Image: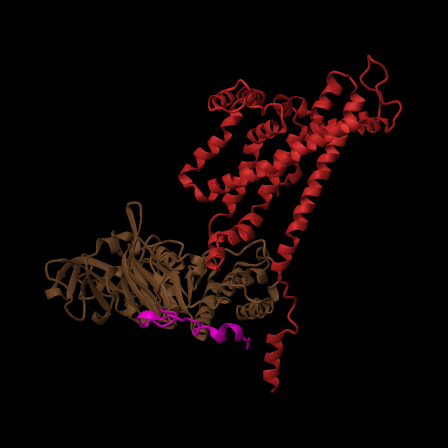
Chain colours: A brown, B red
Amino acid sequence: MTQASTIEAESGTAPEPVTSRGEAPGTVVIDTVTKRYGDSTAVDGLSLTIEAGEFISLLGPSGCGKTTTLRMIAGFEEPDAGDIRVSGRSLLGVPPYRRDVNTVFQAYALFPHMSVAENVAYGLQQKRTPKSEIRDRVVDALDLAQMRGFADRKPTQLSGGQQQRVALARALVNRPSVLLLDEPLGALDRQLREEMQLELKLLQSRLGITFVFVTHDQGEALSMSDRIAIMRSGRIEQLADADTVYARPASAYVAAFVGQQNFFRGAVAERGAAVDSAHALVRGASPALQEGTAGLAAVRPEFVSIDADASADASGAVNTARGTLIGVSHLGETMQYLVRLGDDQSLIARRPSPEAPQLAVGDAVVCSWRAESVLLFPADDAASAGGYVAPPTA
Amino acid sequence: MRRRLPGFLLAAPAWAWLTIFFVAPVAMVVWFSFGYKPSIFATQATDKLSFDRYAEVFSPTFFATFQNTLWVGVAGTVLCFLIGLPVAYWMAVKAPPSRRGLLIALVMVPFWTNFLVRTIGWQVILSPEGWISTALQTVGFEPLAILNTRGAVLLGVVYNYLPLMILPLFVAFDRVNGPLREASKDLGAGKWTTFFRITLPLAQPGIVAGVLLVFIPLMGDYITATVLGGAKGNMVGQLVASQFQTAQNWALGSAMAVVLIFVILLTVAIGAGIVWLVTLPIRASHRLVIGAPAAAPASVSIREEVAA
């Protein structure tokens, strides 16, 4: 194993003389923060408490305010209202270079005229760290990021993934209480991204530093975070761990953004327990809606089973939809089926590959699901019309 | 498969242009400089080659003029740099992005008027009867006596050449703006450190371009110096021109031109050397060379674990 003595030694126990309000070092408190740009409100009265040592993801589409929130913690933007505290100390008016946080930038922002080692040493040089100590800590940080062998190269001689590691080492070498990551994996190819996700998570639990991770990739958020804050128009729509966000989304917006969903829109029926859509009567396990309003029912593709339609009878039972298979794709562990229910609606079903039924494009199929897997929400035009419904394409 | 055209063909027109209008004339000038003026009716002859014209160039009169040219060239370039740098930085970093187009246009405005006319304009303004002088006299000052001094020459030089310094510097600063400067501050560096360790080193190509764009034409310019400096404004360019036009001694004119080229090259080299030497200790203090790992630690330790 690689040794990371100088980074692990003091992280988490970083010298913090004043710890007011009982907030432990590494705690980030965002207290009703608002940030406006001209007429548009990027962050709208946001409150969020991030525990020390927590890995939290800010998840949302572009323009939801997640990057603005991160930049306010880093100090590149000042909030118009509200307070931001790190380790119990308000950061209002504190310039970025006096904050005990470091950032891994989206495009890495490595200094092209310095070597990898000099990039990593830059932060320590600002703190007037003795030369011999700088050297040791730089070597340790590079070991940690597995970039020791590249220490004397220029950033332009590195691949994207290697630059990413250097950016990480350059931030971590300063032993910040909080590390901010602004979509750091966005530029990497898929395999490398998944590798880095795993490494980041391991690194974070080993160092115990608070990680605030901004991403629009729900897979990234789900795989790494202790908690996920799903953001929408400058507010938090839901704040919970990955299991809860996935299984019990607080709104149709969250349901649509995290994982894929099949949405059925229609009038609420059966005393609030079902949505009567054009192509199926979708019933949930228990009443959740107001009779007489418009509702949205959501079913994840993995809960939908699919079979050849044997009966000529077109009348649909509850939680059943009939249609034509228009696409089959192999996703590795699962097979994905795209079924056309009507001109305006298609349905996605996913079955594990070993037990996937043999169906051909053009077959008449019947899809069904259990009431327990149905989520019911009040109709939310912004969520479902905004393109967050599972796209009707294979 | 279609055969690709070799890439150098793209540059062929430029090469041809440079060869015909730059390399050939310079070669001719060098050739003429070894010749002599055979009679009062001929401009040059090269049947006997010698270094005699160069000996003539290094007479005390010419030496004084060279000195003056070098002084105006170096002082003018340094002034343009010192004045242009903050302006370009402000335009690229501090000014609101929506106003940048307007600011660049404002920098360019003087170029819309003829170079000579602009310089003569300054002569009018700075003359003892000009409005500045009159205004000063009404407040009780002496008449303005700046015209025909080096001060006036420098003023004209800065006015005429400043845009050539500002534009490349602006482009360079604009390129460095953004994440790199934010990263520097994120890592604990204040404004000045960020400027001297990130912004300025990365703007180096723009600085080099600006300095050369000002210094080289300035060394050959004699209009600004003559119009505003009078007798104090003797420049080598003027001497070269008078040898070609008035004295009809192309051989001597050519030798002066060649010496001027070498003085420019030498000055640029010395200037670069001075900057390199001055920044050497600063760069050395920030250098960090780690070197190869002592022994590949990861792979060795794994093997040892397996063996144990």
Is A4 in the magenta? yes
Q: Quadrant of the N terminus of chain A?
A: bottom right
Question: To which quarter of the image does residue B237 belong?
Answer: top right
Q: Residue furthest top?
A: B41
Q: Nearer the viewer, residue B135 or A99?
A: B135
Task: Give left or right: position of B232 versus B86.
Answer: right
Q: Residue at x 69, y 33 (%)?
A: B70
Quarter occupied by the C terminus of chain A: bottom left
Extreme residue toward the bottom, this view: B308
Q: Position of residue A303 (x, y in %)?
A: 28, 69
- Residue B200 in picture, x, y percent from top left: 56, 48
Residue B248 at x, y = what percent? 77, 17
Residue A391 in sight in this render: yes
Name the main secondary structure of what is drawn in magenta.
loop
Determine the image quadrant of residue A153: bottom right
Q: Closest to the observer: A58 or A90?
A: A90
Q: Is A203 positioned to the left or the right of A357 in the image? A: right
In the rendered structure, the answer to whether residue A382 lies left or right of residue B63 reads left
Q: Is residue B102 above or below residue A296?
A: above
Residue reaching furthest front?
Answer: B140
Q: Which residues are magenta?
A: A1-27
